[in-house]
Amino acid sequence: MGGLSLTVVHIGKPKKPFIHSGIEHYRKRISCHASLFLQNLKAVPLRKGISIGEVQQKEKERILRVLDERQIRVFLDEKGKSFRSSDLAQWLGTHAQQGRSQFLFVVGGPVGISPELLQDAHMLLSLSPMTLSHDLTLLVLLEQIYRALAILHNLPYPK
C-alpha cells in the first residue's frame, strides 16, 4: 500500500477548546501513517435575506477552489453510506492498492453541502444516524480515519 494523502476540508473554524485539542491529538497520530492536510474554509453566515441555497452555493465555490480532480472525493452527509471502522479501513486500503491514494473529505457547515456538489462525490459518508454538530463531525471523522489507519497497519487500538 502506497502512502495515503488525506485532505480534510471543514467549513468554519471549530469553536470549542476540546474540539481543537482532539483535532491536534488525531492530526499527530494520523501524520505518522499518512500525509494529512486540514483546511478550514470560511463559513457563509446564514442571515436574514440569504437563503440556505445561497449559503450552500457560496460554500460550494470555496470547496471547488481546493478540490483536486485526482482526489477521491468523500463528502459527509446524513444520507451517506455508513461503515464499520474495519470496512472504512478496507475501503481506503483497496483504493491505495489500486494506486488511488489521494482522498478529500469534506465536512460541510451548519446548512450542509450543496446538492450539486454532493452529486460530484465518489462517496457520501455518514458517521452516525444521529445529528452531530459539524465541529464534532470533524473530530469523529479524524478519529475514524486514525482508527482505519491503525487497522491497516495492524496497530493496537483501544476499543
Image: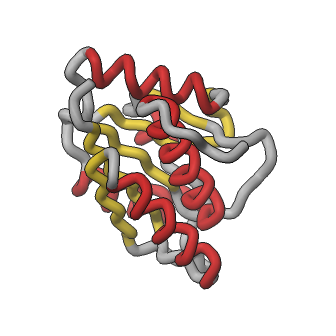
Residue 139 in the image: state x and y as whole percent: 58, 60
Residue 94 in the image: state x and y as whole percent: 37, 17
Picture quadrant of residue 74: top left
Q: Nearer the viewer, residue 46 or 42?
A: 42
Q: Nearer the viewer, residue 99 or 66?
A: 99
Residue at (57, 40) in percent of width and height? 156
Residue 90 in the image: state x and y as whole percent: 48, 21
The answer to whether residue 61 is seen in the rendering is no
Return the residue found at the far front.
156
Relative to residue 38, is residue 101 depicted above or below?
Answer: above
Q: Nearer the viewer, residue 99 or 114?
A: 99
Picture quadrant of residue 14: bottom right
The answer to whether residue 150 is seen in the rendering is yes
Image quarter (top left, top right, bottom left or bottom right) of the N terminus: top left
Which color scheme does this rendered protein use?
Answer: secondary structure
Q: Nearer the viewer, residue 142 or 138?
A: 142
Return the residue found at the far right.
130
Left or right: where 97 falls relative to 78: left
Residue 98 in the image: state x and y as whole percent: 25, 15
Numbered circles on residues, count: 0
Left or right: where 86 falls relative to 32: right
Residue at (28, 38) in percent of width and height? 4
Residue at (48, 76) in percent of width and height? 13
Residue at (55, 72) in percent of width and height? 50
Relative to residue 129, is residue 42 depicted above or below?
Answer: below
Image quarter (top left, top right, bottom left or bottom right) of the C terminus: top right
